[in-house]
Amino acid sequence: MNFFAHYFCLGFCLLSIATSDSLAFGAEPSVIVSPFGQMEGGELVQQFTMRNSSGMQVRVIEFGATITEIAYADRHGKNINVVLAMDSLGAYVKGGPAASVIGRYANRIRNGTFSLDGMTIQLSKNAGDHHIHGGKKHFGKLLWKGTPSEGRGEPFVTLKHTSPDGEEGFPGTLEVSVTYTLTEKNELKIQYAATTDKPTVLNLTNHAYFNLSGAGGDVLNHELQIESDQTTIADSLLIPTGDFATVDQTALDFRNPHRIGERIKDVYDFAKGYDHNFVVRGEPGKLRLAARVLDPKSGRVLTCFTTEPGIQFFTANGFNNNPFPRHGAFCLETQHYPDSPNHPEFPSTIVRPGVPFQSTTVYQFTNAQ
């Protein structure tokens, strides 16, 4: 038996144990490492299975620092995965929907260009004449290096990546890490950190596709509340103009809970569904409530907290039943505003040497009574 086959067999056994045991209450919090696949270049891709004492389970792989499972029980105790996931490494490599880290710059930058300290920076263009989500080989398409927690306590895994100077046009060598922690409060805490050796811009998020009923149906009956009074006005390309608009008396008003599908047709001319950046109330940099989603069918509730100034609400408008249906998930992408480098009036995304970047987002899971 060669090394990879032996490694896979050992990992599969561990993974099987984790699957059967981790969904039971009272289990000791832990992280189990197992193989997930092998890249074309021969690199092994590890998967980290975290579990807490109440039975919640989270799995993360090194490719794209991707969350492949968040298993949480409904009001009847049934545990299912509430993030859309692919069944193989190859499917992720080909670009299937993935709860991956997006960077260096999540969302859009007009014309793929901006000015930084008097210099014009030209990025790769991968959305027509524009730049989106970090380029053709964004962070969700790269192999990270993961290290699990050691000892007892809340399980976590830290994944690291070095982005070289000039990658996709971005200046500076960037050392970036993301730490996923599964808490005893049934929270998935995501902590981003980065340093650079040259001034650059940075906007990190996770593009998790959630369906609190599990994969297969749409999320139009999920009830959403967003802590926001304003959105950034965008043009037909979904790129901000620099102006803001109140959500009052519009289909973007989620200050009180509404079904996602209740007014979605009102924004079909814009993006065939929701794909909007909301300004989160409160002070950026401080962890605060951003959004809450209830699935009446299962009783599951997802509450999102973030230190970021904005949140992009997206309803998987391009899904076409291959393999998930249209509006088969929602995304709550906590981030800075799209195209911020071209709008000095927006919160700054500039990162400089000696001033580390930090950002935290928490997804908490509960059940409605």
Image: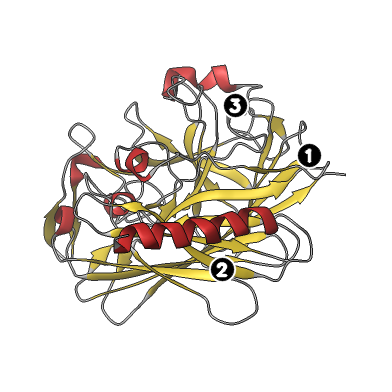
- Report the disc number at residue 31: 2
Q: Residues within 10 Å of mark 3 (few under 14, many from 20)?
A: some
Front-most of residues 32 and 180: 32
Q: CA distance from mark 3 to mark 1?
A: 24 Å
Q: Give the residue displayed 46% in from the left and 62% down from the top.
A: 10
Q: Amino acid at mark 1?
A: Gly
User: Which is closer to the viewer, label 3 or label 1?
Assistant: 1
Label 1, label 2: how far apart the Cα atoms are: 27 Å
Q: Position of residue 363 (x, y in %)?
A: 61, 55
- SS class, disc 2: strand
Q: Residue at x 32, y 54 (%)?
A: 103
Q: Horizontal and vertical percent for residue 100?
A: 41, 50
Q: How is the image coloured?
A: secondary structure
Any mark on residue 299, and which? 1
Q: Which residue is mark 3?
A: 251
Task: Please tell me whether mark 1 sits on a helix, a strand or a loop.
Answer: loop
